[in-house]
Amino acid sequence: MRATDSAVLAAVDLGASSGRVITGRVTAGRVDLAEIHRFANRPVRLLEGLRWDIHSLYTGVLDGLKAAGEVDSVGVDSWAVDYGLLDADGHLLSAPVHYRDTRTDDVPEQVWQTVPAEQLYARTGIQHAPFNTLYQLVAAQRTAQASIASRLLLIPDLITYWLTGEQGTEVTNASTT
């Protein structure tokens, strides 16, 4: 805590169409929230399909944190199913695939041939949606990026890695995959 007996926390909230940085000033018995910066989150259509413009998102995060000034801690949150693949040196291999990309349209049925849908749900408790991480990973398993990837980071973990240099997995976000 600061000498003034308060803390300033920054929250990075990434949504499907926009991102924002919010600060919370914590003092005795009170939290004051302020939206510091809002920025667009627009997917891009590439030859490979629909992708997140992750570098633009990161720039929006940096701009927001700069506008926030000195903070004591930063947390990053986003949707759960999408991820970036990193090589052995920690470099992002390609723009993360957008969950609305069509590459997973027929994948659930393929997976259910190995693990029936009811059994999969009983084990994970996760709804059946073709964009779930499991189906994305199955769709990606024969790609060049998957063959050389050393690490998978969910979107908030990827942004946190770029901010801190530390790779990790936030358990509540990961539990939804």
Image: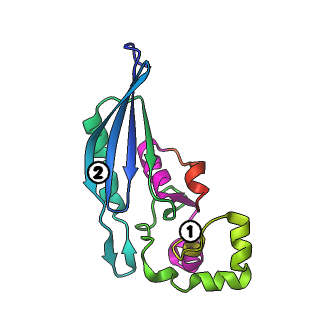
Secondary-structure class at tag 2 = helix
Figure check: 81 above or below 158: below
Q: Amino acid at mark 2?
A: Gly
Q: Which residues are magenta?
A: 138-165
Find residue 53 and report its horizontal and vertical position in percent.
33, 64
Q: Residue at x 34, y 52 (%)?
A: 58
Q: Nearer the viewer, residue 141 or 128?
A: 128
| Above or below: residue 60 compared with residue 121 | above
Residue 26: x and y in percent read 40, 25
- Judged left or right of residue 146, residue 53 is left
Residue type indicated by callout 1: Thr
User: Which quarter of the image is occupied by the C terminus?
Assistant: bottom right
Q: Is residue 49 magenta?
A: no
Q: Can residue 41 be seen in the rendering of this structure?
A: yes
Q: How far separated are the C-alphas under marks 2 and 1?
A: 25 Å
Task: Please name the predominant secondary structure of the magenta segment in the image.
Answer: helix
Which residue matches tag 2? 60
The image shows residue 93 at horizontal and vertical percentages of: 46, 66
Q: Is residue 171 above or below residue 128?
A: above
Residue under the image location 35 percent in, 82 percent down:
47
Q: Which residue is mark 1?
A: 133
Quadrant where the N terminus is found in the figure: top left
Residue 169 in sight here: no
Q: Secondary structure at mark 1?
A: helix
